Image (tube, rainbow, N blue to C red):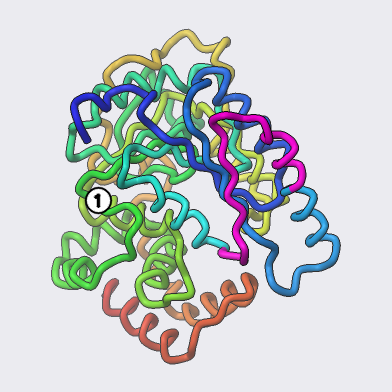
Amino acid sequence: MTAAQTSLTDITVVYTTYKRTQSLLDSINAIQRELPDLPIYIYADQCRNGASFAEQEAVRKHRDDLRLSFCNSQNIFLVFRSSNLGMRNAVLAVQDHITKGPVFFVEDDVVPLSGFSEFLAFNFKLHFRDPSITSICLFNPLASRLPLSRSCTITRTSMYATLIWNNKIPVVSRLRYNEIKLVKSDKAIQRRIVSLLSPEGLNFSLLDYCCRSFNALDCRFTFRQALYGTRGIVPPVSLAHNFGLSGDGFNCPDSEHLRSLFSVTSLNSMHSFSLTSTPIDYSYDLDCLAGHLSLSSSKALPRIYDCSDVWSEYVQKHLRSRRAYISSKVIATLKSYFKRLIT
């Protein structure tokens, strides 16, 4: 990244979408109100194999609506996938742009709130040369549990509605053998990995490493944040609505718990924080965050150990629900590795 790349005019907005039209339009409108000149790329996934007629029609209508909405746009570009890529859609979408400059990655169910660009611009200019900072996220899971007077840096951030740029973390590429080897040989890193990632996050990171049919951008990103000890900037309160937590998405179960974590406080009613103050260096390893969420390492570890006993069944069930395939040999390899990692 060059010294000239210190403003938001140099970033590219990347969306992935399947069939949510209205929230996508609302999200793009929110971005264009504050950053009207940014190039926006929308990667629309194709219908899944075996989808019902109603779902096929919904995807077709979604694509038609996008063409109609943006046919005269000078800076919005549509990319229609010819087959269903699932999680890999996000990987390839970011891969198309991350080597050229910073990417603001947004899903079609996330709508930024007023003031988000001020927060992004201030922190990007302040931290883009810092090798320990890899992202600036609009979500803050701390906000509903821990009052904050200003932004902070934490290790684990969300991957969605997040400004990312190439740093010492290879954001897009598959987890590498040397990275897995480093984790297996260093007990301190193992403890950090286990304390930072949920059982699902760790399981899916290992899946992404071992199975070519599984490509999850957020798994790679959060695993590497934990591995390298890098951090992201989060605002005092969440600066985006996430409609995917309503349960209408294929990968998003209805979750009251998640909605409470990512609750949005009206900016107009808040006077005790600033979006443009130097962030508090809150935590290098998230143990402090885990404590505030009543998920301290001592309590979280037993959950992960318990998970290993039913791990293969858990993975097979989840992948079947996604119509994905994973061989019994890969299941056995992953289960064996998972047990070695945490014992």
Q: Quadrant of the C terminus?
A: bottom left
Q: Quadrant of residue 246?
A: top right
Helix, strand or loop at mark 1: loop
Q: Quadrant of residue 289?
A: top left
Q: At which x and y percent is residue 295?
A: 41, 50
Name the kind of residue labelled 1 in the image: Ile
Q: Quadrant of residue 86?
A: bottom right
Residue at 27 percent across and 54 percent down: it is 170
Up/down of 285 relative to 175, above or below: above
Q: At which x and y percent is residue 138?
A: 46, 32
Q: At which x and y percent is residue 87?
A: 52, 61
Going by the image, does 323 lie left or right of 168? right
Residue at 79 percent across and 62 percent down: it is 56
Up/down of 100 relative to 218, above or below: above
Residue at 36 percent across and 33 percent down: it is 136
Q: Evaluate whether residue 264 shows in this view.
A: yes
Q: Evaluate whether residue 141 shows in this view.
A: no
Q: At which x and y percent is residue 42?
A: 57, 44
Residue 273 forms part of the magenta stretch: no
Going by the image, does 265 lie left or right of 236? right
- Magenta residues? 64-85
Nearer the observer, 83 or 190 = 83
Going by the image, does 217 lie left or right of 56? left
Residue at 28 percent across and 41 percent down: it is 134
Up/down of 199 relative to 167, above or below: below
Farthest residue to the right: give it.
54
- Density class for disc 1 (Cα within 10 Å; few <14, some 14-19, many ≥20) is many
Residue that mark 1 sits on = 169
Q: Quadrant of the N terminus?
A: top left
Residue 67 forms part of the magenta stretch: yes
Farthest residue to the bottom: give it.
329
